[in-house]
Image: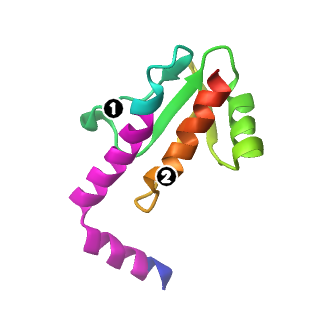
Amino acid sequence: MAIGYSLDLHNYIGTARKQQRLHFLKNYWMERVRELSKIRLYTSMDPRWGCAIGNVGIEGKASEKFAGALFTDWKIHVTTIVWEQVDGIRITPNVYTTTDELDKLVKAIREIAA
């Protein structure tokens, strides 16, 4: 039953608008942390190469410690990605994620990366 409601919402929003919103949300937080000296963005901001998911790491800090600080101190849940040259956390907003929530994420990343 829930899947029907989800499909109805998706159809109401439309694929193109959903994609635009998700890309906007990803770029919103990435633009606000990319200038920090220790920040490493593993995800392109170019809409041709992704949509909602962003991956970020902090130079000199293991992703497990980064994720732990986000959860313990900020109650932000993320997933760690450690693979080949990537040691970061995956940020996955949804269409209903607010910019206020992303501002909290940005503040947390800035504090942890300081």
Residue 69: give its label: none
Question: Looking at the picture, does residue 29 appear above or below residue 84?
Answer: below
| Of callouts 1 and 2, the N-terminal one | 1
Q: Which amino acid does label 2 sit on?
A: Asp
Asked if residue 10 lies in the magenta stretch, the reply is: yes
Q: Main secondary structure of the magenta part?
A: helix
Image position of 11 (left or right of 103): left
SS for dot 2: helix
Residue lying at the far bottom of the rendered structure: 1
Q: Quadrant of residue 5?
A: bottom left
Q: Where is residue 110 in the image (x, y as percent from the top left)?
A: 58, 29
Q: Which residue shows up at 44% across the image and 62% down it? A: 96
The magenta span reads 4-30
Q: Position of residue 112 (x, y in %)?
A: 67, 28
Q: Is residue 29 left or right of residue 72?
A: left
**Is residue 22 part of the magenta span, yes or no?**
yes
Q: The C terminus lies in which quarter of the figure?
A: top right
Circle 1: residue type: Met
Of residues 28 and 10, the one drawn nearer to the viewer in this rendering? 28
Label 1 to label 2: alpha-carbon separation: 20 Å
Left or right side of 107 for 49: left
Identify the secondary structure beneath mark 1.
Answer: loop
Q: Where is residue 16 in the image (x, y as percent from the top left)?
A: 22, 57
Q: Residue at image x 53%, y 20%? A: 39
What is the x, y in percent for residue 54? 46, 37
* Residue matched to label 1: 45
Q: Residue 100 carries which label?
A: 2
Q: Please indicate whether residue 2 sits to the left or right of residue 111 in the image.
A: left
